[in-house]
Image (cartoon, rainbow, N blue to C red):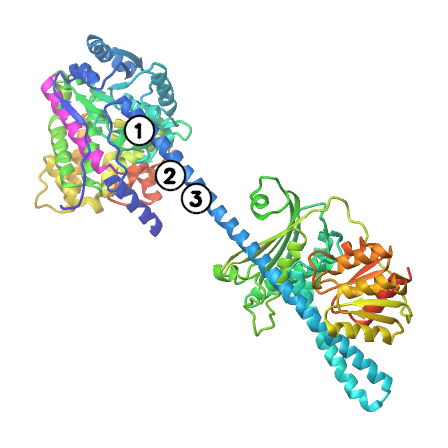
Amino acid sequence: MIELRKFVAPEFIFGAGAIDLAGRYAQNFGAEKVFIVTDPGVIQAGWTGKVQQILENQGIDSSIFSGISPNPRAEEVMVGAEQYREHGCDVIIAIGGGSPMDCAKGIGIVATNDDHILTFEGIDNVPIPGPPLICIPTTAGTAADVSQFAIISDQEEKVKKAIISKTAVPDVALIDPATCLTMDSYLTACTAIDALVHAVEAYASTAHAPMFDLHALEAIRLISANLEKVLAEPADLELRGKLMLASLQAGLAFSNASLGAVHAMAHSLGGYLDLPHGECNAILLHHVMAYNYPEAGERYREIGKALGLGVENISSKEVKKLILAEIIRLKLSAGITASLGQRGATISDIPHLAKKAIKDPCMVTNPRVPILRDIEVIYEEAL
Amino acid sequence: MKKPSEEVHREEMLQRIIGLGERSLKKSYYPELQKRIRELEKANHELQHEIQERLKAEAQKEKLEFQLRQSQKMEAIGTLAGGIAHDFNNILSAIIGYTELAAIHIEQCGNAANCRASNDLEGVLRGADRAKQLVHQILSFSRQKGGDITAVNLEALLRETTRMLRALIPTTITIETAIHTTTPIIMADATQIHQVIMNLGTNGYQAMLAKGGRLQFDLSETDLPVNDPMVTNLQLAPGNYLVLRISDSGCGMNRETLAKIFDPYFSTKIGKGGTGLGLSVVHGIVSLHKGHISVYSEPGKGTTFRIYLPKAEQAAGTALVEAHPVLQRGEERLLIVDDEADLREVLQRILENIGYSVTVAATPIEALARFTATPHDFDMLITDMNMPEMDGAELIDKVRALRENLPVILCTGFSETMNEKSTRALGRARHLVKPVTQKELHETIRSLLDS
């Protein structure tokens, strides 16, 4: 309890209408020209245009960069940084899901440090912070808007690399649940399960601490209680707000406590097969939990409580059964039914996937220390 | 099974994630400030680099200053040693001279009972000869005695010397030779350079006596430009040099020992056969050849000597060899000048003994007076170099003014200005280094008078 710990979080504004503050914050940062990082889906949903209009009303010029893949690539970051400089921008606004936000973090880092983005891979390897960054999330799951993580795809090695640094924390997050209204149900399900995985892994992380635990457990409660409701009532802003809050709380927890094997394995998988991050997490979660159970039983019992399960006064073995069943039920009811095999992975991919996963920084805080073969077995089970 | 190193790494990564002790830069809201931070980071980096460079330069300077102090010290010791050698030579001359005379007298008596005394006198001469060698070593060190300078192929000399070393050194020590030059020619006294290599090789062997090891000889060449620190700080002439590196993997030396190794009579092997003169002689020889010797050593790791010797401009020629004249009796009239009565008497008696008629003078003034009175009564002048009032060279000038081309012999114990070469420049003249033996003296007189 008295261990020295710190809690890193950006200034954030949560609530309907937060997006309207983009202009004021850009002006607070002394912006003359804003570099807007986004993707085609968000542009089509109209959010990018809205932000551009808000800036214009404030008398601030802007330039849009949207050449981003669903898993943002190192080359795209480099092109973005070049454009940022060419257009003489001084503030970055990211609007969208995890991809534009991670890409925007990368662009900022390259713009000030002037080196290839992949040279900053790992923990605390960014010497100088990027220019002011405002994040406006339009999904409820990634929480890149509050985290110190940026995940960039290395196309050469076909793996996603994690850049973990205080300098990757945005300067301000404008979290507006209204932006979630434009998500389809599969994206809603995948991002919500992503947030659930954030909360579960942060809570079970070997770097957990009481003040992060609060946020993790609250996130699990909110998702467990509201995911199915949102999928049934996608236009209910109140319900969307609950999932958005869950995403924020999970983000605050994992940004400080870090993650575990699910993310390490999902990064390897997403980089190799170019699969959506949330879906990878959803497919792997219960397999990893089963593997971790011997080392994380007591923490998982608390997770069971947050999931609303009656886990008191029953054996650890029964708790495990109950929790895994609930996770699988939640996933299937949200419509995530595919296995890794169905999503294109084969048994021959597994050695490569495992080798990359075991080296991922997220693996460091997994409650159980795996050997290579353990990782292979988990992948095999998820096939 | 997890390797412990992996666990340590994992723990280290975990601590970094937890974020204690990390470098945590606060994001700034102002782009201007970001720029300033960047500039400061860069300036800081440059400053660190500059500090490193400066430290390096200071260390280099300190090293060169040490080397300069060292060479100045060697020079001072050299001068002192040379002076002592001069006095010592005069004393030795008397000892050798009287002993030779005593031997002659005993022989003339032809008494067999005196045989034992004869043997004893030989013992005296042997002892005196050893003393003479020692004085020569001191003179080599003090740069006063130059040898025969010819073009020498250092590679051939090195190979020959290492062959000799191989025969002397046990096989627990490997000897390696590497040559990185195609024109290994220097102007040198081959015997002295041989002595240098033998001496350093033997030292290396002694350092590796306990455990065996590697003795490496490496010959390369380098060009020292005018602005090279070796040139500006150590008074080496700019130009091409051969560099002979001699390394052993033996016990090495500490800093304190290192500072003294070239001092005469400093030895770590006193009582074990070391005279303490070896390295000082090596230093003297290298200096005499206008080269430089440096040493690097680490206790327990080994020692490396680096010898710089100026490269010769032309290819190796052949040394001039002098034919020895046949010994015979003489009858010429000689004028001998020496301010030391003992030496004067010894010379007179030795020379009269083999037939010469000898006139002696105690001072150059007296000698000049006698010569001026009857310049044609003398066939040769034999003079000491260092005398009060007038030195030998000046006396020769004055005498030659009266009789051009008079044969002269100049004897020195020690002279900074005269050597074999400069004496020959005087024409019919020879130079002898004291102490001289009867045989040397007679051969020299004949070579002058019979030519």
- Three-letter amino acid code at disc 1? Ile
Residue bearing the label numbered 2: A355
- Label 2 to label 3: alpha-carbon separation: 45 Å
The segment highlighted magenta reads A236-260
Q: Is residue B421 left or right of residue A143?
A: right
Q: Quadrant of residue B279?
A: bottom right
Chain to which mark 3 belongs: B
- Three-letter amino acid code at disc 3? Leu
Q: Percent from the top left, x then y, of residue B362?
A: 76, 69
Whether residue B300 appears in magenta in the rendering, the answer is no
Residue bearing the label numbered 3: B55
Majority secondary structure in the magenta region: helix
Q: Are marks 1 and 2 on the same chain?
A: no
Chain to which mark 1 belongs: B
Looking at the image, is mark 2 or mark 3 nearer the viewer?
3
Secondary element at image label 1: helix
Residue B23 shows in this picture = yes
- In this view of the protein, which residue sits in the foreground, A38 or B94? B94
Q: Percent from the top left, x then y, of residue B413?
A: 71, 65
Q: Is residue A107 left or right of residue B83?
A: left
Is residue B64 depicted above or below A111 in this figure?
A: below
Is residue B209 depicted above or below B39 in this figure?
A: below
Residue bearing the label numbered 1: B37
Chain to which mark 2 belongs: A
Q: Percent from the top left, x then y, of residue B91?
A: 69, 73
- Label 1 to label 3: alpha-carbon separation: 27 Å
Instruction: Give the residue drawn at x 47%, y 47%.
Output: B59
Instruction: Give the residue drawn at x 30%, y 29%.
Output: B37
Looking at the image, is mark 1 or mark 2 nearer the viewer?
1
